[in-house]
Image (cartoon, grey):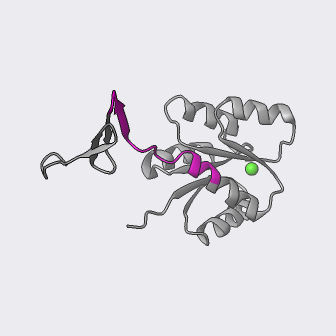
Amino acid sequence: MNIRNKVLVVEDEKSISGFIRAILSSNGYDVIIARSGSEAFSMISSHCPDLVVLDLGLPDMDGMDVLTQLRAWSLMPVVVVSARTDEREKVRALDAGADDYITKPFSPREVLARVKAVLRRCARPSHVLHLSGLTLDQDAHSVSCDGQRVPLTYKEI
Ligand code: CA
């Protein structure tokens, strides 16, 4: 099964959101767009995106507030895009929980590469449990003891 990652782009400038949508959707991502902070929150709860690309300059609120509010309840990956090039702004966003920070103007390839890298880092860890010699691998449905695979019945799998 091929699961496409869904990316929410929070950006009020149509030309920029369109440009990000074009590069991401042509590379196999589903892209949805919010044009304000409040729209972003309603789309996050209704669409559960895998990653958010967040502009800091939004019409109704500062993108930093969107990030801070989101981080109060979610570890959803966030890539900030901003025209703010001040190092302090970048540090503030990263400290507030941004996974990456892209400075405008940026190239399409840079956005794509950073989105890919963040999604790779945040990919679901495999569910493997080690207990003194015993290894339980939930994804592979296997159990091994001191490296030897333990045969399981259908029910146990
Ligand atoms: Ca903006």
- Locate the N terminus by quadrant: bottom left
Horizontally, residue 44 falls left or right of residue 86, namely left
Queried whether the magenta region covers residue 154, the answer comes back as no
Q: Nearer the viewer, residue 70 or 136?
A: 136
Horizontal and vertical percent for residue 7? 56, 56
Instruction: Indicate the quadrant where residue 15 lies.
Output: bottom right
The residue at the point 43 percent across, 49 percent down is 46
Horizontal and vertical percent for residue 135? 33, 37
Q: Nearer the viewer, residue 68 or 58?
A: 68
Residue 120 shows in this picture = yes
Farthest-out residue, bottom: 26
Queried whether the magenta region covers residue 130, the answer comes back as yes
Instruction: Indicate the quadrant where residue 96 lies.
Output: top right
Horizontally, residue 4 falls left or right of residue 129, namely right
Horizontal and vertical percent for residue 125? 46, 43
The residue at the point 87 percent across, 37 percent down is 86
Farthest-out residue, right: 86
Q: Nearer the viewer, residue 127 or 36?
A: 127
Horizontal and vertical percent for residue 151? 19, 48
Horizontally, residue 155 falls left or right of residue 107, namely left
How many numbered circles are shown? 0
Residue 35 shows in this picture = no
The residue at the point 69 percent across, 58 percent down is 113
Q: Which residues are magenta?
A: 117-133
